[in-house]
Amino acid sequence: MRSTTIAAAALLGLSAIVSARPATDDASYQYTDGSTNENGQEAFDFPLDNGFPNITVPSANLSAIELASLGELPIAPNVTASNATASGPSTVDLGFVAFNELFEVAFFTELIYNITYNVPGFGPDDVGPQRDEILAILTVHQAQEELHVLNANGGFFKNSGGFTVEPCEYIFPVSTFNESIALAALFTDVVQGTLPDVQTTFGANQDVGLIRGVGLVIGQEGEQDGFYRGLLGLAPAGLPFNTQSAVDFAFSAIVQSFTKPGSCKSLDLLQHPPFATSGGLSLFDVLSTETDLGNGKEDVAGVVFSGTPVQVVAAPSAQVNSLITEAQCITYLNQANAPVTVSTTTKQVSNAVVEFTADFPGKILDFSGLVIAVVTQSAGQQEDCASIVFADASEVAAATKFGPFLFEVNNAVADLLSGSSSSTTSSSAYTSSASAYSY
């Protein structure tokens, strides 16, 4: 499947990238027989050699994970322990966290494997002289993400009435070490902007006992992000305020870009939870761009975005998810600024492809860091798009039909030393860390 949410990347040359395939069969994880994409790439599948994610608490396997993680899995009583059962919306968000953390464990496991076994693109010359140190740090991150999964799924199990979020099969659109690190940095940015949305849901539903755990993890995500950005020669702290995101955006990005269609057993549970009368997570159709956005700091007129169906089963959907007869807009989110909506012209290319042409206001809006673009529905004519006011990312998500398209605008450390901020780079769109909390 085409890498639909990857932006043009001047630094890494990301375009039509595919994942590396393991060179041997003795990995600490498994590859499903016959589970390949159109490029012949095999899908990552659980469980790991230690049985993860099926880990008994307590157990020798858990103790080994804790030792590798430099810490411990929170157990009750803990800082977020609560005797009350969380509300349906809060429990749905707990399920998202577990869903995301499973993806992260898969990502780091494959990255560690590729480096360890010198898969092409991940050899000593690609990783550099700090290879051993990087492997040691990534191994810590992998173990920490395993604890995040166990923590989030434990909370989800307790509050959902006994359900567990199961892993998908994953395909990672990266073929080099640098592309993998760029992906890790980008999705860590997404997660840091998404966790406050989770906290907001907890607070709005009076599940305040869950908030502290999320806050404790945001700092850990920032520590990871600074490490990845440092490896890329970027300023470790990319923004004074992370770009705001929404749970539905991060959920859609993972499903659209990293999972094998038809492999996610928990999609229906998260989208139609029996324990939440208010509904579950939204899964949007895919938004990509046919236009080079350059470094993301300039205005680009007439950018062509393509909307295509999200594939959640083996066969593509027959129709896209939105009615193109209705007016559509492009909405941009960047930093903690108010979302900005611009007008589009819409063209149906085929039964499953819709094109949206809109301006990219990189200079006008002074874009920096993570930029999120989505197609939102206008209440009136397309000329009314500019007058639409969204209060925050949650309101944008409620009106979204296609997306997210993720684009990173970064300043290199070399630019900081030279006193210039004009030489910027963009890196791939999507993911790396979410976090879990203590329940």
Image (cartoon, helix red, strand yellow):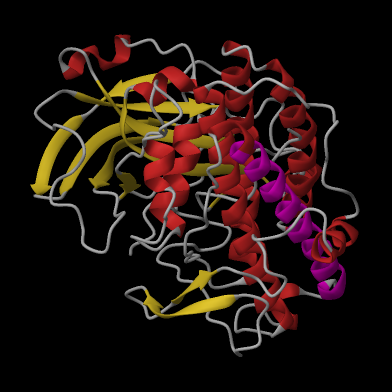
Measured from the top left, where is residue 107 in percent x and y? 61, 62
Q: Is residue 427 magenta?
A: no
Please determine whether, in this image, residue 82 is positioned above or below residue 370. above
Residue 194 image position (x, y, % from top left): 58, 32
Provide the residue span drawn in magenta. Answer: 131-157
Left or right: 200 in relation to 138: left
Residue 424 seen in the current view: no
| Residue 398: quarter of image | top left
| Residue in the image at 82% along x and 46% along y | 73
Q: Nearer the viewer, residue 222 or 77?
A: 77
Magenta stretch: helix, strand or loop mostly: helix
| Picture coordinates of residue 321, whole percent (x, y) | 21, 39
**Looking at the image, which residue is at 72% across and 26% down?**
240
Q: Is residue 152 left or right of residue 190?
A: right
Q: Residue furthest bottom?
A: 24
Residue 251 lies, with reference to residue 25, above or below; the image says above
Q: Nearer the viewer, residue 220 or 204?
A: 204
Of the 4 image quadrants, the one containing the C terminus is top right
